[in-house]
Image (tube, grey):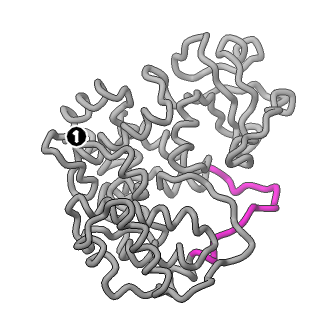
Amino acid sequence: MAAAVFAVQPAYAQNMSFDSYVQLLMAKARAQGVSEPTIARMTAGLEPSSRVIELDQAQPGSPTSSGYPPLSNYIERHVDQARIAPGRREYADARGTLAAIEREFGVPGEILVAIWGHETAYGRVRGGFDLSQALATLAWEGRRRDLFENEFLALLQVADKGYSRSELQGSWAGAFGNPQFLPSVYLRLATDGDGDGRANIFTNRADTLASIANYFRDAGWRTGQPWGVGAAVPRGFDTAAVDTELVAPVCPRVHERHSQFKTVAEWRELGIRPLRPLADTTLVSLFQPDGPGSPAWLLTSNYRVILEYNCSNYYAMSVGLLADEIAR
């Protein structure tokens, strides 16, 4: 899901009835210029969802364990033929569209298709929650009120573009469409990929892929660089000597697993060899998630762009590896 990571607040803010809170949301939507018919249809019969509250309250806080599950197990489950085969079909079928999108946005087509496959199995699994109910519930619950109140108001602005409430379904946390954008992300980055005047990320492949490309360009994708390449690490290499000394302001446990950034030439001097061509001046970090003797990679800054979509090494690695398989 294309979303930022937010701190868990210790208390909830259900300080008014749900109906009263919805009235407050309606007033804020009016102040933002949402039409009365849209407000009426998107709030008709709203009541809190106990299932959404249950799912939200089950979300973990900051992890305390220093251990990490093996990456190899995750890759086996997520970079499999069930994703590779249909990904290759989509990639082949959309070749012309992807070429045009890559020319405009600079993001390789296989990366776009891999995100689509990872997020919704190429559009087959987009979520069945009523977004209006889910986001209103999450805002009222109060654990992350500012986030979800803003997303509910953004959802009404999306609906005001002519989407029905039945179309606006998605995950319990408010992500929707083929790329699983939050409403605020849709408003900022959804893109018309086929020139019909509408950014339909629900059923339109060109719009879906162009929107993902726009997200990646906005996040800083560098054209001409891979996300990363496999690396050969000599036996006995002291990875502790190249541990990063930086503390990332977002998702620190994700970024702490990457080494210092060095040029490819500097890594070669230390005995680390890229297994695919990569310019000597490219800055990369070393990542060997399952320990000495296991597969390792040299990651470019484009890997961090994938992390912007979902801040998880398991997610980003599986997207990169799935993209490589799709393009193979």
Relative to 252, does residue 5 appear above or below in the rendering? below
Callout 1 amino acid? Gly
Point out the stretch of residues depicted in magenta: 56-71
Residue occupying the point 36% across, 37% down: 213
Percent position (x, y) of residue 2?
47, 51
Chief SS of the magenta region: loop
Q: Callout 1 environment at 10 Å: few (<14), some (14 to 19), or many (20+)? A: many
Question: Looking at this view, is 71 or 282 the one in front?
Answer: 282
8 displayed left or right of 239:
left
Q: Nearer the viewer, residue 270 or 306?
A: 306
Q: Is 77 positioned to the left or the right of 265 in the image? A: left
Q: Which residue is at the front of the view, 296 or 300?
A: 300
Q: Quadrant of the C terminus?
A: top left
Residue at the location (72% across, 76% down)? 11
**What residue appears at the point 50 percent right and 81 percent down from the top-left corner?**
21
Horizontal and vertical percent for residue 154?
40, 60
In the visual, does 306 lie left or right of 254?
left
Residue annotated with mark 1: 193
